[in-house]
Image (cartoon, grey):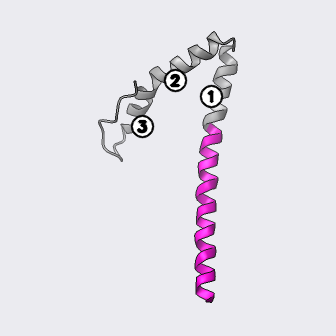
Amino acid sequence: MIVPPQRIKGDPDRRIECQEALEREFQALAQRAIGAGWSEPEIDFSLLCLSMSEIRRKSCNAETDRQIREAIRLVEGEL
């Protein structure tokens, strides 16, 4: 079970609290992968890559959204 945050957004310790809340599930996921036959280095690398890909995806989506808003402003300004 992942526990909900106790600290408010912006609290400098909230990220650490989130890591602690996710750690048990994270370890359980790694153990299930080991049970399926994956090695720890493979699992570590894959989880890191998945996290990085998710961060990049969100960043790209935010940039695309910004570009769409800008294009709409330009088009609406020409009407």
Image coords of residue 17 (percent x, y): 38, 32
Q: CA distance from mark 3 to mark 2?
A: 15 Å
Q: Closer to the N terminus: mark 3 or mark 1? A: 3
Q: Secondary structure at mark 1?
A: helix
Tell whether position 45 is magenta. Answer: no
Q: Amino acid at mark 1?
A: Leu
Left or right of 76? Residue 13 is left
Q: What mark, if any, has residue 74 been given in the picture?
A: none
Q: Are marks 3 and 2 in contact (CB under 8 Å)?
A: no
3 or 2: tag closer to the N-terminus: 3
Q: Residue at x 46, y 23 (%)?
A: 23
Out of 17 and 34, give the one closest to the viewer.
34
Tag 2: amino acid: Phe
Which residue corresponds to the image point at 60% horizontal and 52% vertical from the top-left? Answer: 59
Q: Which mark is residue 15?
A: 3
For disc 1, the marked residue is 47
Q: Main secondary structure of the magenta part?
A: helix
Quadrant placement of the C terminus: bottom right
Q: Residue drawn at (42%, 37%), measured in percent from left and top?
A: 15
Residue type pointed to by label 3: Arg
Q: Give the residue drawn at x 60%, y 73%.
A: 70
Residue count near mark 3 (Cα–Cα under 10 Å), binned few <14, some 14–19, many ≥20: some
Q: Hey, which residue is sitting farthest bottom in the picture? A: 79
**Magenta-drawn segment:** 52-79
Question: Which disc number belongs to residue 26?
Answer: 2
Position of the N terminus by quadrant: top left
